[in-house]
Amino acid sequence: MTNSYLDSVIKQFEYYKSLGDKTIHLLNIDELKKEFSNDSNSISIIVKHMAGNMLSRWTNFLTEDGEKEWRHRDEEFIESFETKEELLEYWQKGWDCLFNALQPLHSNQLEDIIYIRNQGHTITEGINRQMMHYAYHVGQITFIGKLIKGERWQSLSIPKGKSSEYNSDKFNQVKQRKHFTEDM
């Protein structure tokens, strides 16, 4: 496998991060902490969980199990951010850990085995597992943001009723190979 896989997954992670960034940007700290029911999670809690997961999974991921002894997962679901800045700092810390782990990888390492909770995964499987986990949670973040903002929501992709216009623009361009995120 060539490095196209690694380039692609880094772009995908960047894309999901950007969706989270844009949603967080639209909200104040009270909105970020809003829970819709006693057993639901706020965006703030989802951010705390995602960053905690990233720090655990990607710190020394080639040589240590992805579930670190120092991680206290249950505490990730307890509200603790006082400010939006504090939330953003922790969010960025998690993503920095992920990107710093992925960027030095080479395609010849993708079949190497890493462990998450003592379960062996190829690096490719581990990357895919985490990408889907983060996509799932970023989807929650954006959906909660949309619920909070209601009619004041700013679409992060193709707005409702604009698909034909969007497709027309795309099909009027010259065919070329590039990652879909390059136009965003």
Image: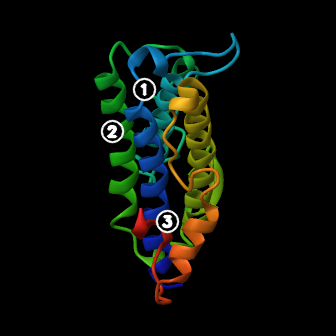
Is 149 in front, or is 29?
Answer: 149
Callout 3 crowding tier (Cα within 10 Å): few <14, some 14–19, many ≥20: some
Please name the residue shown 56% across and 56% down the image: 158
Whether residue 116 is situated above or below residue 15 in the rendered picture: above
* Left or right of 39, for residue 87: left
* Left or right of 58, for residue 147: right
In the rendered image, residue 30, in percent from the top left (x then y), is placed at: 44, 14
Amino acid identity at mark 2: Lys
Is 110 in front, or is 85?
Answer: 85
- Residue at which label 1 appears: 27
In the rendered image, residue 46, in percent from the top left (x then y), is placed at: 54, 29
- Residue at which label 3 appears: 9
Please name the residue shown 47% across and 80% down the image: 4
Amino acid identity at mark 3: Val
Whether residue 31 is situated above or below residue 97 in the rendered picture: above
Callout 2 crowding tier (Cα within 10 Å): few <14, some 14–19, many ≥20: some
Amino acid identity at mark 1: Leu
Q: Secondary structure at mark 3?
A: helix
The part of the image, by quadrant, that contains residue 38 is top right
Q: Residue furthest bottom?
A: 175
Q: What quarter of the picture does the C terminus occupy?
A: bottom left
Mark toward the viewer: 1 or 2: 1
Label pair 1/3, CB-CB below 8 angstroms: no
Q: Compute the Cα span from label 2 to label 3.
A: 19 Å
Please name the residue shown 49% across and 51% down the image: 16
On residue 93, the disc is: 2
Give the mark, 1 or 2, whose residue is nearer the N terminus: 1
In the rendered image, residue 67, in percent from the top left (x then y), is placed at: 54, 39
